[in-house]
Image (cartoon, rainbow, N blue to C red):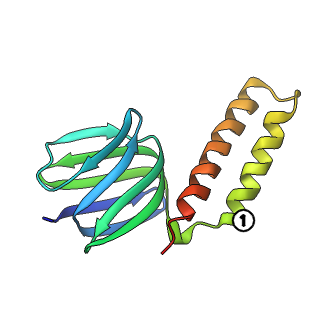
Amino acid sequence: MTAFQLKIVTPDGLEYEGPAEEVVVRTTSGDMGVLAGHINCVAPLGMGRAMFVINGQKKYAACIGGMLSVNGGQVTLVPTTFEWAEEIDVARAERAAQKAQSVISTNAASNAELAMAEAKLKRALVRKAVATYKP
């Protein structure tokens, strides 16, 4: 496959910069794949698994929120939250899921607390699912 330049930058800093052959990310309207020669576009990122082919090897990450930009053959991923599968702390994700579920199951939570707990639960479930792709 033909490579293109990929840059992944988060609020915490640069996660990756270099060649890639393929990117598949979850956007707010579904999964989107990018190969070399893709048209210029910008897409808002949803919450889900991201897959990258780098040097012929598949790598996976939990990718939540942010933007994807394809411009002049350069692909820039600017997620709000990004964790490579091998870096995910599964025990921490499980604790976050349990805590969120306990808030959801109480009748005392406000609408705002309920919405926040649901978002935290979704993030924790994505992280746990992506962690199964550790090399």
Q: Residue at x 15, y 47 (%)?
A: 38
Q: Quadrant of the N terminus?
A: bottom left
Q: Which residue is mark 1?
A: 91
Spot the residue most to the top: 111
Position of 1 relative to 99 (above/below):
below
Q: Horizontal and vertical percent for residue 18?
A: 25, 70
Q: Horizontal and vertical percent for residue 70?
A: 21, 47
Q: Quadrant of residue 91?
A: bottom right
Identity, as a three-letter code, of the amino acid under mark 1: Ala
Q: Quadrant of residue 127?
A: bottom right
Q: Horizontal and vertical percent for residue 95?
A: 76, 57
Q: Residues within 10 Å of mark 1 (few under 14, many from 20)?
A: few
Left or right of 24, for residue 126: right
Q: Residue at x 16, y 42 (%)?
A: 40
Q: Residue at x 48, y 75 (%)?
A: 135
Position of 17 relative to 49 (above/below):
below
Q: Looking at this view, is 72 or 94 the one in front? A: 94
